[in-house]
Amino acid sequence: MSSAISLVGGRLFPLLDTKYRIPKKSRESNVNEGKNKLEKKLPRTPRDNGKKSMTFIKVSPDYLHSNSTSHTWAFSAVAELIDNAYDPDVNASELWIDKRDINGKTCLTFTDNGNGLVPEKLHKMLSFGYCEKVAVGNHQPIGHYGNGFKSGSMRLGKDAIVFSRRMDVMSVGLLSQTYLKSIKAETVLVPIVSWDLPNKTRRTTVEGKHNLSAICNNSIFKDEKELLSELDSLEKLRTGTRIIIYNLTKNNNSGNLELDFLSDPLDIRNPESHLIDYSTINRTVHEKSPEYKVSLREYCSILYLKPRMKIVVRGKKVKTKIISKSLSETETDVYKPTWLDKPVGIKFGFTSSKNPEDYGLMLYHKNRLIRAYDKVGYQRQANELGVGIVGVAEATFLTPTHNKQDFSRDEKYNAFMTNVGLKLNDYWNEKRVGPNTTAAGSSTHKVLAPDWLWAQCDNCLQWRRLPAGFKQDDLPEKWFCHMNPDAAFNRCEVAEEPEDEDEALMAPTYKKTFKKQQIVQKQKIKLHEKQQIKEKEMLLSEKEKQLQKKEMEIDQKKKSESYIPIVDKLRKLEEKAAKQEKMIEALHKERSRQQAASRQMLDAAEKINIINQGHSELLDKVARGASTSSPNKKNGLKRKHSSDSICIKTEDGSVVEIIPNPNQEKEKRVVDLTIDSDEEQESEDPSSSKKLKEDSSKSNSKPDPGRSNSSDASTSKTEDKKPNLDKLKEHINKPDPGRSNSSDASTSKTEDKKPNLDKLKEHINKTRTYKEQGVQTEGRSESQEEMGVRERLESFQRNVHELLRRIDPSKDWGGPENIESIIVQMMKHIDPEDEDADAD
């Protein structure tokens, strides 16, 4: 019997059934002819009732592989095959999982002692979308979509052959990707062969012969005898099914088999499961993976919430355990959503596993494990809160995914997970934080003993609770009910003890005092905060009153002190007036000082005029050749005379002859001390300035008399150039045009000029002092009149200094600024050096 499978209207149907007959031809031509007929015209099914046939959709052989990729984990594919043996339609009590080598091929075998499969049921199992499983009593079927065997077997290997035995018939079916690829099939073809019992005669049908040929030529069994031998091995079980998977999946990187059969001869390991999903929690993860991800034996021990089937892995029985009854400090909480008819019980307790990562929420659906050790509540935080707590719940109200490794993430799932996290936090607070904290909670990773020890009978598969004092390691490999010390439950005929979840759950089994304490504490804190707020308000009110008083006082002060600005202004005006009076007084004092200085200057000028008159008389006497006595005689001083002299014109117009150094021979010059600049000299006396220029040019053109070889020659030159005394006398006796005016006028002119000279002198001396001290002076700018006077004074000082330097070059006369004191002494005919000589 050969069949093809396709999908129609969301369900998968066989394209060929047992009533379709293939003509008797060779196998290859028969297959090709069958393909052509499928493409042109499809046979009528019993439901057609003679009506026109319909075109069915084909299923590509590649779909077998793509469908298997829904299992990202090898053990999830194994679980699909275990579920098929556990479901009520098979109802196997034992399942053997082993590794075998058949004709040089490494095979993975699954053998159960269930009800077995008739050919029609085997055909549906190998097809897609057929699920006729129903509940038997409290035994709910796990299979739901009719896809578990195809996805699971093709995930573990490329080819799978199924042997099934019932009391009256034996069947063999082949689901092989290798076979479909070899014949280049365009749709999935499943050859099935059946034998009747007890005679073991093959059913004589046309398709049966070709299907047997296809199985023998494209499987690990080469003839019918080997197939019957494999079926005979099931005879001791009377009924059962064996699935043999070969061409097992290999790792892409290493090329080795995905499943490890060598590390442990009594187990099947999954090396790919060593990696841990680091996104589940934000905590330092141990290098060792959870044991259920690595060991098939450990995974099978927790695969069912209430194990009803004995599983043997590679010849050794798996010690199945009820997780909810293997915890320490077990308590039950209740989840009661509005959209559920009855509440859901959630058991919490501390794990007794030696693996530190075996904690979290265990979610089951219809007794089948969906999510293991899922971290919720405190366990998702980066601390030690919630570590070691295991929660167990059967969430039949949630919808599992096709691979049965997760739930659909809908609103019900999110609400349930959030609520479970809060309940886990409550359990932790009561057991490890609240007043009910036990001493065992001091170490979160300490291995704790379970509250009760439960054992499963190998005969009736019922669970019995053992008295206190028993340990898991003390139990034998095979345990039976008669070994139970409790006489009430030491026979297989006695039912199991009633469980808490079978009773009506109305409230948690423990009191949640921690929340109440927190509420009370929060209330106390609120009361304390309210009292503090009242006290602060009282203080604020008092401060406000004090501030109001201060504001009143300040307002009164402001009103009383409103006249202060006026008084301040009056004071400032008075101070300003006093300063002005002081300034006026200072100006008056300065004016009187200037007047006194001007009078002193006038007196000095008169003295100078008197001296000039005396000098003119002296010159008159000298011109007459008479020996006269100068005013120096009154002082007992003597003056040396020389044939050479220099004449000085004074303010009153008289010319004074000054006797130079006798060692220096020079041309007589008339130095006009009344001239300020060349322009003034030319304007007043053009003839004299012209004469002076001619004399200076002549003196510059002549050689230095000091450098002459003979003293006689120099003396003769000097005598030749002596001035005419008569002319000099006439010039001296010549009336001064400045004196022609009245004395009042001259006095007024003198008064106008002298104060300016005195101020200029004082200003120059101050400036020179500041410069010597390195002080920068800043003052008002000079007027044009003051600048002119200052320039005339400086010109006068330079002329006199040049005159004295020419008279006696060997003497240090100082700078032009010291000329005034020297002139005053010379006018008095006092020379410190001559005075010392006369004294000698």
Image: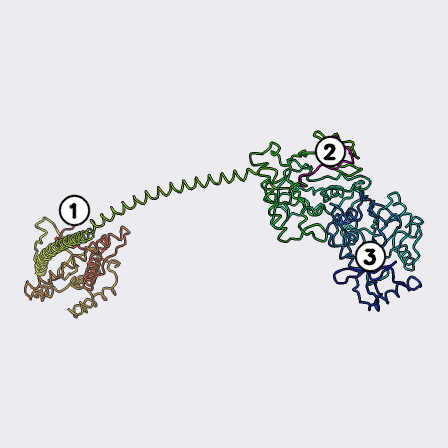
Position of residue 269 relative to residue 751, above or below, is: above
| Circle 3: element type | helix
Quadrant, the N terminus: bottom right
Residue that badge 2 annotates: 472
The answer to which of marks 1 and 3 sits earlier in the sequence is 3
Is the Cβ of the residue at disc 2 closer than 8 Å to that at disc 3? Answer: no
Position of residue 313 relative to residue 57, above or below, is: above
Whether residue 10 is visible, yes or no, is yes
Residue at image location 78% in from the left, 31% down from the top? 483
Q: Amino acid at mark 1?
A: Asp
The answer to which of marks 2 and 1 sits earlier in the sequence is 2
> Residue 15, position in %: x, y?
82, 62
| Residue 261 quadrant | top right
Residue that badge 1 annotates: 836
Q: Residues within 10 Å of mark 3 (few under 14, many from 20)?
A: many
Left or right of residue 322, residue 713 in this image:
left
Q: Nearer the viewer, residue 266 or 456?
A: 456
Position of residue 20 relative to residue 104, above or below, is: below
Label 2 vs label 1, nearer the camera? 2
Q: Nearer the viewer, residue 801 or 578?
A: 578
| Residue 237 quadrant | top right
Which of the numbered marks, if any, corresponds to residue 177?
3
